[in-house]
Amino acid sequence: MTTALITGATAGIGAAFARRLASDGHNLVLVARDTERLRAQATELHDRHGIEAEVLTADLSTDHGIASVEKRLSDRKQPVDLLVNNAGFGNKGRFLDVSMADELTMLKVHCEAVLRLTSAAVPGMKARGRGGVVNVASVAAFVPRGTYGASKAWVVQFTQGVARDLAGSGVRLMALCPGFVRTEFHERAGMGTDNIPGWMWLDADKLVAAALADLARGKTVSVPDPRYKAMMGAVKLAPRGLLGGITSKTGRKYGPR
């Protein structure tokens, strides 16, 4: 039986990955900051699907937290076959409204943690000739979106580069770029969502199903919804100056996730 490690596993897209992978018969390593919530989730998934669900409490905004997950991913006796780098958050406000400490924390979670955890997982996967890494980015990676969009753009470029370097190794990497998803993401950041049209919202479980299908097909970038595929096609044709004006009006506090 294969094992998947999911960061940010207790809510939103991470929880949807956990539900789907458990239902498919994968053992899980669930990573988040809230131990009590992790234990409740692990018990529920074990009881419902008969899989083993390991709990790993870690704050990926700290070196200690990242190192603890690196250690688990590097354990060759308990190999991880699929890594889902999902942990992330948004900062409310435009540039200069957010403290430098909060900006650096975002880069720590979105970029450094993704880099280090991917680097910890991939050598064992390559040695076994199989494995996968899903790095959750955002469609915000493709438009001017302040630090949030920039960090997600880094995730996309990093994932594509590593996927190219590992071509033919049996290890697949994919950047998942969702739009607005009904999760706790915006509420936790104190972001309003009243101005977001209903048609733009995605269901987390359907999103994950589409993402796993794209991973199986060998895609390196997944935009798993026809609506957002069309929007991203339009973005490629739009002048950068126009995009900058639009995104500055909506504000980066509405960054999709």
Image: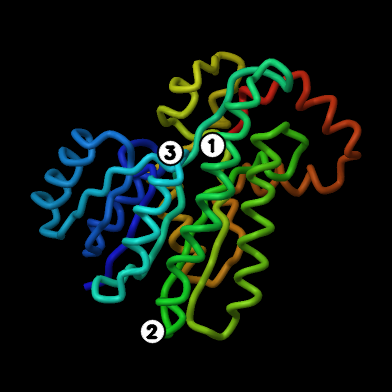
Q: Helix, strand or loop at disc 2?
A: helix
Residue shown at 50%/21% (left/top)? 189
Q: CA distance from mark 1 to mark 2?
A: 32 Å
Which residue is at the front of the view, 107 or 251?
107
* Residue 251 appears in the figure: yes
Within 10 angstroms of label 3, few (less than 14), some, or many (20 or more) residues?
some
Q: CA distance from mark 1 to mark 3?
A: 11 Å
Does residue 156 appear left or right of residue 234 in this picture? left
Residue shown at 72%/31% (left/top)? 146
Does the residue at mark 1 contact the one at mark 3 (Cβ under 8 Å)? no
Tag 2 residue: 128
Q: Quadrant of residue 228?
A: top right
- x and y percentages locating residue 174 in the rendered image: 55, 62
Which residue is at the front of the view, 114 or 184?
114
- x and y percentages locating residue 177 in the rendered image: 58, 48
Within 10 angstroms of label 1, few (less than 14), some, or many (20 or more) residues?
many
